[in-house]
Image (spheres, rainbow, N blue to C red):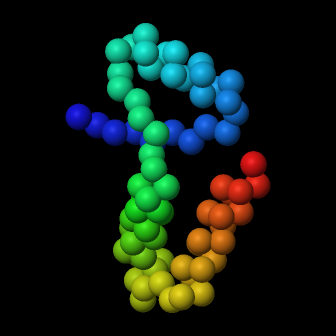
Amino acid sequence: MQNLVISIENPLDTQLLLSLVGRLGLKVRTLSAFEEQMLARQSIVQLSEQENYSEGLDMEDIMSIVEEVRTERYQK
């Protein structure tokens, strides 16, 4: 089984996608706030393992990433 996370901003797109998923016989569920936070943390860990962050992320880098995510999420 594979999982896919899709972020949708437009409610009309949500209805279209849910209709398509139903027709294809696929399962869908909404992530909880906790699951979203865990995915964000996982992304930060993966980012810290990249070559350009070989020295690790300091608190300033982490807060910058968190602020970018917050800005993107709440500008809707």
At x 64%, y 26%, the residue is 13
At x 48%, y 77%, the residue is 52
Report which quarter residue 48 is drawn in. Answer: bottom left
At x 35%, y 15%, the residue is 25
Q: Is residue 34 above or below residue 44?
A: above
Q: Is residue 39 above or below residue 26?
A: below
Can residue 50 be seen here? The reply is no
In the shown orientation, is residue 76 left or right of residue 53?
Answer: right
Q: Is residue 19 above or below residue 69?
A: above
Furthest residue toward top:
23
Report which quarter residue 41 is drawn in. Answer: bottom left
Q: State how many labels appear.
A: 0
What percent of the width, then of the height, locates residue 1? 23, 34
Furthest residue toward left:
1
- Residue 50 or residue 36, whichever sits in front: 36
Can residue 37 be seen here? The reply is yes
What percent of the width, then of the height, locates residue 54? 40, 83
At x 68%, y 24%, the residue is 12
What percent of the width, then of the height, locates residue 70? 65, 64
In the shown orientation, is residue 73 left or right of residue 47?
Answer: right
Report which quarter residue 4 is drawn in. Answer: top left
What percent of the width, then of the height, locates residue 32? 45, 50
In the shown orientation, is residue 63 left or right of residue 58?
Answer: right
Q: Is residue 26 above or below residue 40?
A: above
